[in-house]
Image: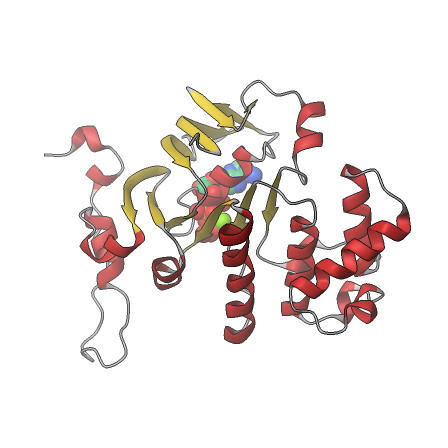
Amino acid sequence: MDPILDVQNLSIRYGGAPKPAVRDVSFTLGHERLGIVGESGSGKSTVGRAIMRLLDTATITADRMQFEDVDLLAATEAQMLKIRGKRMSMILQDPKFSLNPIQRCGHQISEAYRTHMKCSKAEAKARAIEMLEQVHIRDPERVYDLYPHEVSGGMGQRVMIAMMLLTSPDLVIADEPTSALDVTVRLQVLQILDGLVRDKGIGLIMISHDLNLVRAFCDRVLIMYAGRLVETLDAKDLDNARHPYTRGLLAAQPRIGGSRAPLPVLEREASWVNPQEAV
Ligand SMILES: Nc1ncnc2c1ncn2[C@@H]1O[C@H](COP(=O)(O)OP(=O)(O)OP(=O)(O)O)[C@@H](O)[C@H]1O
Ligand SMILES: [Mg+2]
């Protein structure tokens, strides 16, 4: 089966930046859960935003960046407006910054839906309420009429997810979707995303710096370091990672019942950034 997304040699340089934020990143995404892990600043969100074509100030080069039948390198902004939020969606970390504070939650969902789907307001509302139910919001009719500041962080995140999923996208990029949530809500959100991959066959990119979460939740994992992809692994093989950066990350994870000696500090080497200089 053709991949949902095919990215070959993607490099991204922000305007005015001395070096590219992302260099020569290649991967494909099928109907699976693909994790992107790496420390802060390694370029994970930049890759996600480039796929959504949300980087106005950056220069993007790639040999190929294909989403289904869409060439993302050549698509016009008018084409992207039809695709973004409909066939591909991005879930961000913090609902506080993603929801409009002066519009009721439910209205935002139905407006987003009506941007892409021709239907009456009443129909959009019914679909939005149905979707709120699907993301386990208990009293969806009431929540529909609440403003974002009247819902909890976890509820706000599920409102966001409902909005992003209502159009049944084929590709969902979740950028740290659960780091602002407490553990129980986090599990619920992961279950919702998991259900989408299983039942609707979407492709999910899960950006995170939480190795344990990615190990448990994803099928495959890309490890990024300083803008490069240093390793691609099946999630189940994460413990057998070969790259010294990945090994260092794993060694720095605390374990319940593990040794109480201080955790090792990751020793970085210049060759990880410039593989040509290795050896
Ligand atoms: N809008 C921007 N303009 C200029 N540079 C940027 C911009 N956004 C990110 N960068 C730079 O690009 C690099 C990659 O940032 P990015 O946000 O992709 O990292 P990340 O892996 O998502 O980190 P985090 O885990 O903290 O979210 C960083 O060096 C960052 O400073
Ligand atoms: Mg980020």
**Which one is in front, 108 or 4?**
4
Q: Residue at (27%, 56%) from the top-left corner?
A: 236
Q: Is residue 124 above or below residue 216?
A: above
Residue 222, visible in the rendered structure: yes
Q: Is residue 160 above or below residue 76?
A: below
Q: Is residue 174 left or right of residue 225?
A: right
Q: Quadrant of residue 103?
A: bottom right
Residue occupying the point 53% across, 45% down: 202
Q: Nearer the viewer, residue 130 or 98?
A: 130
Q: Position of residue 32 (x, y in %)?
A: 43, 46
- The residue at 27%/57% (across/down) is 249
The front one of 42 and 79 is 79
Q: Position of residue 279 (x, y in %)?
A: 9, 34
Q: Left or right: where does residue 47 sit relative to residue 185? A: left
State the image coordinates of residue 229 (x, y, percent, origin top left): 32, 38
Q: Position of residue 57 (x, y in %)?
A: 59, 29
Instruction: Report the residue at 73% width, 70% height from top.
Output: 151
Q: How is the image coloured?
A: secondary structure
Q: Quadrant of the N terminus?
A: top left
Counting the numbered discs, the total is: 0
